[in-house]
Image (cartoon, grey):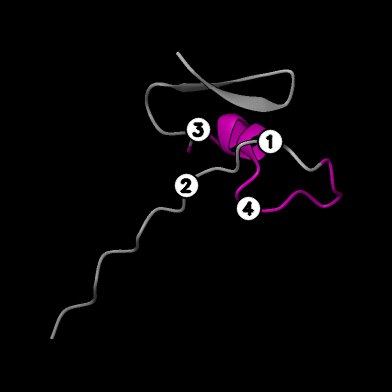
Amino acid sequence: MGKKPKKLKKPKKKCCVTKPRCTRCPLRMLAEGRLPAGYGVKHRKLVTV
């Protein structure tokens, strides 16, 4: 039996500005390069590009 592929979590709509940042934070996902294609971050909010 093989392992199931890991389901990608969608980013939050808005950054909650907590320290340490949560794993679904759009700012963190952008910095790590994990933000889905077609999305960007502007003023700590998730926007479509």
**Which residue is painted at 34% across and 63% down in the image?**
6
| CA distance for labels 3 and 4 | 12 Å
The amino acid type of the residue labelled 4 equals Thr
**Which residue is painted at 54% across and 43% down in the image?**
11
The amino acid type of the residue labelled 2 equals Lys
Residue ranking furthest to the front: 13
SS class, disc 2: loop
Mark 4 surroundings: few (<14), some (14-19) or many (≥20) residues within 10 A:
few
- For disc 1, the marked residue is 14
Residue ranking furthest to the right: 19
Circles 1 and 2: CB atoms closer than 8 Å: no
Relative to 10, 30 lies left or right: right
Mark 2 surroundings: few (<14), some (14-19) or many (≥20) residues within 10 A:
few
Pick whichever, 6 or 14, lies toward us: 14
In the rendered image, which quarter is residue 12 located in?
Answer: top right
Q: Could you tell which of marks 3 and 4 lies nearer the N-terminus?
A: 4
State yes or no: residue 41 in magenta: no
Pick whichever, 21 or 44, lies toward us: 44
Quadrant (top left, top right, bottom left, bottom right) of the N terminus: bottom left
Mark identifier at residue 2: none
Mark 1 surroundings: few (<14), some (14-19) or many (≥20) residues within 10 A:
some
In the rendered image, which quarter is residue 27 located in?
Answer: top right
Rendered location of residue 5, percent (x, y): 26, 64
Circles 4 and 2: CB atoms closer than 8 Å: no
| CA distance for labels 1 and 3 | 17 Å
| CA distance for labels 2 and 3 | 13 Å
**Residue 34 vertical placement versus 41 (above, below):** below
- For disc 4, the marked residue is 23
| CA distance for labels 1 and 2 | 12 Å
- For disc 2, the marked residue is 10
